């Protein structure tokens, strides 16, 4: 009985938060949708991608978790850096992705007022979000919602960057050993580029799909 009550309360809270964020995102020029599940988020994303679009993406666990990345590999023309056989080829594919039709991503955090926060090591993801692809589709779990811009930046550093760094063997940053951000200035840092997106220009170019589940990190 307690578990059912908690589940109901979580569902209601997520629906309320999702509706609030959708409106605040729209007020900032973003396209915005709330989806309760990963499956709904996948279908919403696919509804936004024309069949003739070339699709690419940055580093995003979220788009993999909802099945979007694999679906696009199977049904769309894609620019996939993971197919590269050399570092040089990988870099070239990342450059080509900046002129794709649809770029898939998530965000490291989103504020309760509707601002998106990104931290990048290479800058390819932040570059695409800023300019180039015809549209950006950002799939973001409600676990990434933060009250203020400062708390969103803190989350990006303390949670997202630390976990992301552990995905790449050989990283020697202090956070890999301690789990705590040291705001380091090292060659291996994951935090070379920090981007806050306040509005979408043109209106609707950046489309945000909020997911009422814990997806990504």
Image (cartoon, rainbow, N blue to C red):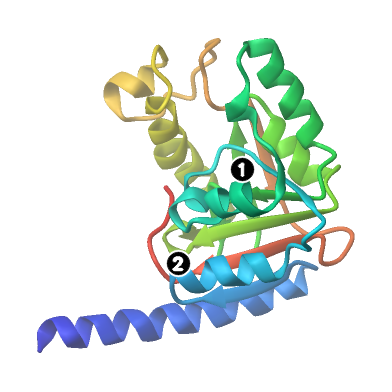
- For the residues carrying marks 2 and 1, which lies nearer the camera in this image? 2
**Disc 1 element:** strand
Q: Residue 213: horizontal and vertical position, in percent?
A: 39, 67
Residue at 42%, 15% (x, y): give it.
Answer: 171
**Quadrant position of residue 100:** top right
Q: Residue 168: horizontal and vertical position, in percent?
A: 43, 22
Residue at 89%, 60% (x, y): give it.
Answer: 202
On screen, residue 13 versus residue 41, left or right, reads: left
Residue 137 or residue 127, whichever sits in front: 137
Residue 44 or residue 144, whichever sits in front: 44
Whether 153 is drawn above or below 39: the answer is above
Whether 175 is drawn above or below 119: the answer is above
Residue at 77%, 68% (x, y): give it.
Answer: 28
Q: Residue 183: horizontal and vertical position, in percent?
A: 49, 24
Whether 169 is drawn above or below 145: the answer is above
User: How far is disc 2 from disc 1 in space, using C-alphas?
Assistant: 22 Å
Q: Residues within 10 Å of mark 1 (few under 14, many from 20)?
A: many
**Label 1 sits on residue:** 118
**Label 2 sits on residue:** 38
On screen, residue 32 versus residue 149, left or right, reads: right
Residue 60 or residue 9, whichever sits in front: 60
Residue at 48%, 84% (x, y): give it.
Answer: 16
Task: Name the quarter where the N terminus is drawn.
Answer: bottom left
Q: Residue pushed farthest front?
A: 74
**Disc 2 element:** helix
């Amino acid at each position: 009985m307690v578990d059912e009550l908690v589940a109901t309360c979580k569902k209601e809270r997520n629906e309320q938060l999702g509706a609030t964020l959708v409106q605040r995102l729209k007020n900032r020029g973003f396209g915005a949708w709330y989806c309760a599940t990963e499956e709904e988020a996948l279908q919403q994303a696919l509804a936004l991608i024309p069949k003739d679009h070339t699709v690419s993406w940055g580093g995003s666990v979220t788009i993999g978790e909802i099945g979007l990345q694999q679906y696009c590999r199977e049904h769309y023309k894609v620019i996939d850096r993971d197919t590269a056989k050399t570092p040089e080829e990988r870099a070239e594919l990342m450059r080509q992705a900046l002129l794709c039709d649809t770029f898939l991503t998530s965000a490291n955090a989103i504020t309760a007022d509707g601002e998106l926060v990104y931290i990048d090591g290479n800058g390819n993801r932040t570059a695409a979000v800023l300019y180039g692809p015809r549209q950006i589709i950002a799939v973001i779990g409600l676990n990434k919602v933060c009250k203020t811009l400062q708390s969103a930046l803190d989350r990006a550093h303390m949670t997202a960057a630390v976990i992301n760094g552990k995905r790449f063997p050989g990283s020697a940053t202090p956070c890999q050993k301690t789990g705590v951000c040291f705001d380091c200035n090292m060659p291996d840092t994951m935090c070379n580029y920090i981007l806050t997106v306040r509005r979408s220009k043109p209106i609707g170019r950046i489309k945000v799909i909020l997911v009422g589940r814990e997806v990504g990190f």
